[in-house]
Image (spheres, rainbow, N blue to C red):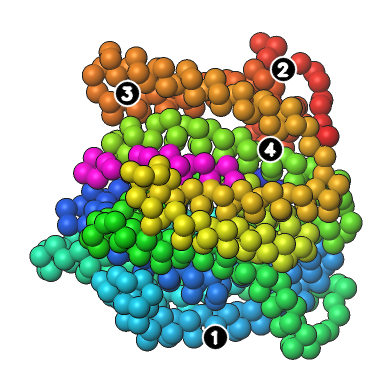
Amino acid sequence: MKNKRIQKESFMKGVFVLMLSQILVKVLGVIYKLYLTNREGFGDKGNAIYSSGFQVYALFLTISSIGVPNAVSKLISEKVAIGDHKGAYKIFKIALITFGILGFACSLILFLGARTISQEFLQIPEAELTLVALSPSIFFVSISCVIRGYFNGRENLKVTANSQTLEQFFKTILSIILVEIISIMSGVDTAIMAAGANLATTLATMLCFAYLYRYYKSFKTEIAWEIKSTVNHKPTRIRKTLKQILAVSIPMSLTGIMGTINKNIDSMTVVRGLKTFLSGEAAKIEYGILSGKVDTLVTLPMSFNMAFSTALVPSISSAKAIGDMPTIRKRVSFSILVTILIGLPFMIGMILFAEPILELLFPNATSGSFIYQVSCFSIIFIVLEQTICGTLHGLGKMMTPAISLGIGVVIKLILNLILIPINPTKFILGGTAGAAFATAICHMISVIIQFKILKKEINLKLDYRKFIIKPLLAVTIMGILSYQSYLLLVIKLGNSKISTILALGIAVVIYFIMLIILKVFSEEEYHMIPYGKKFYDFFKKPRLYGDSRTTLK
């Protein structure tokens, strides 16, 4: 009899589990980033060395594996939906071999080319050791991604959630341990400390792979039972299956590649452009502010929202395989609504509290509040891009996200080359702020193109009062009341750090109250959320909600 443990999860339950995991992952990531930035001898300069090497590594990682989990999950979910478990397992085996070889090749290239990349392309020679330290992890991430994709395709997202949490936990702990050991042994050498922090990434990916492999082995019996009981299986040649995998994974990887190129544009243009009016050392520090502190904080909302982009691919693919268009529209509409409700408060809150947040989190490196504020404008576009991209991939529109983001990346490159060499004293969006502004424009253009295509593809009709006016009203009231509370608390308490924490807590409470008062969610939508029925019943008692069963238009 089939083991209950591998039964698929409901869509929102899977999203909820993965969302909790992503939040924990991000919190752990912020912890080690806080430690590194505030560590004596590391700071913004260390972030520049660490991040420049990491972005090149991320590009190689994207080429070898970034599109793999979603590509494998899409293909497997389509097979599982029609009962072809044998075909699903064949896809898994071929993908494992293919991307294992590709990952190994990318690891070798990065290891051998570390010196040339750091000196010629990045113009940060100290990044060589970070590239060497990171190179082995590409192989382990590549094969880990295939295993994650296999279980995601079965709508078992706990595997991805647990593995990502473990990986980040090990990365955080090992980063602190290795940096401390290296600082004692090397006499606080920033370049070697940065390499040690990246070596922690490699060790963490190895441990993550070990967990995933053991998890997979524990289900071998159940998987074998499924293969024996398979239906609707049509034998295909290995070459044809490989073509199917590559036909899906390459376009998905292209989207990831465009996103990574977006970051690499900064790593290759910011320091160069800033040298027109700053010294080389000062230029590295400015880039460290953008790539270290600012990027860490601005990408925080992605961890809350990434669950939707991951869960939508297999969910939409399986619904499309059986022709269930109403389910597709309902899940897409709800996902976009929640994405907006996640992105807007983060964007407004971070813009208003930029300086207090930096003082709270980075007391030894507080500079960069304006760059942070400009970067925050990209938040709403980045999270919407995540959700819409997952939907389009699930629908089979594989190239659309890559092309739309590619257009945005080209515009970003042009804006970077124009804006970064301008001294900020002459133009407010010059220098590093210009790179932050260019990133926001890049993602805005990408979202506009993707949304128009998605709307046409599934005949999506959204109530603009529900999706735009109510969320904007909620965050406006949240922003005004929370910032006024902050100003009063600073006067009363005389401690800006405690005032910041309390004001941010007040902002969260006010925002949720406004969502309830404005009745942003219908009863049906509450029922889609894990434990949502209990929340709805609680709100209904004091008549905060009526009996209306309004559905998405």
- Of labels 2 and 4, earlier in sequence is 4
CA distance for labels 2 and 3: 33 Å
- Of labels 1 and 3, earlier in sequence is 1
CA distance for labels 1 and 2: 56 Å
| Residue sitting nearer the eye, 68 or 89 | 68
In the drawing, does residue 44 fall left or right of residue 539? left
Task: Tell me the mark number nearer the camera, choosing from 1 and 3.
Answer: 3
Amino acid carrying label 3: it is Ser
Amino acid carrying label 1: it is Ile
Q: Where is residue 379 in the image (x, y as percent from the top left)?
A: 53, 44
Q: On screen, 291 above or below 379?
A: below
Residue reaching furthest to the front? 426
Tell me which corner region of the image, top left, top right, bottom left or bottom right, holds residue 146.
Answer: bottom right
Do callouts 4 and 3 mark residues in contact (Cβ within 8 Å)?
no
Magenta segment boundaries in residue numbering: 362-382
Which residue position holds label 2? 545
Which residue position holds label 1? 101
Which residue position holds label 4? 337
Amino acid carrying label 2: it is Tyr
Which residue position holds label 3? 499
Residue at the location (16% across, 66% down)?
189
Q: On screen, 536 above or below 265?
A: above
CA distance for labels 1 and 3: 53 Å
Q: Where is residue 218 in the image (x, y as percent from the top left)?
A: 57, 69
Q: Where is residue 312 in the image (x, y as percent from the top left)?
A: 70, 53
- 10 Å crowding of disc 3: few (<14), some (14-19), many (20+): many
Q: Quadrant of the C terminus?
A: top right
CA distance for labels 4 and 3: 31 Å
Assign a secondary structure to mark 1: helix
Assign a secondary structure to mark 4: helix
Q: Quadrant of the N terminus?
A: bottom right
- Of labels 1 and 4, earlier in sequence is 1
